[in-house]
Amino acid sequence: MSNLPLTAIAYPAKGSAGRTGLWRTERPVINYERCVKCLICWLYCPEPAVVRRGDDSVEIDYDYCKGCGICANECPAKAITMVEEVS
Ligand code: SF4
Ligand code: SF4
């Protein structure tokens, strides 16, 4: 991340728009064999739905992931796939 330009960052808060996971029609699924822990998905997610673990791996908080697909679109390793939500 050291080569990214400095910029202002807004911190979304859980619950500010309710449980946004209820909006979802597709869900992101991470392939951990492809993930290189670059944290791009964590930076770009507009909700607090990509959770950064202590070892810089990531996981999705499906209570707040609204299924927008930005993480899958931005992942440089193509480690995130959007799959149809099954209710
Ligand atoms: S953007 Fe892709 S490679 Fe980077 S941390 Fe997220 S899932 Fe892993
Ligand atoms: S699809 Fe990805 S970017 Fe969109 S809310 Fe869910 S985790 Fe965040």
Image (cartoon, grey):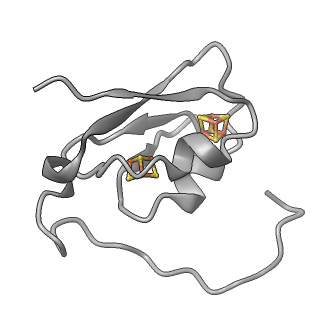
Labels in figure, total: 0
Image spot of residue 48 (x, y percent): 35, 59
Q: Position of residue 28 (x, y in %)?
A: 42, 34
**Viewer-proximal residue among 31 and 72:** 72
Q: Residue 56, position in %: x, y?
A: 59, 39
Q: Name the residue rendered at 66%, 48% in the picture.
A: 74
Q: Is residue 51 left or right of residue 58?
A: left
Q: Residue at x 61, y 45 (%)?
A: 73
Q: What is the x, y in percent for residue 38?
A: 71, 42
**Eyeballing the image, is 6 above or below 51?**
below
The image quadrant in which ligand 1 is located: top right
Residue at coordinates 57% horizontally, 60% vertically from top-left?
44
Task: Locate the N terminus by quadrant.
Answer: bottom right
- Identify which residue is drawn at 89% across, 63% down: 3
Question: In the image, 14: left or right of 38?
Answer: left
Res 26 quadrant in image: top left
| Front position in the image: 51 or 86 | 86
Vertical side of 41 occupied by 58: above or below: above
The quadrant of the rendering that contains the C terminus is top left
- Image position of 35 with respect to 43: above or below: above
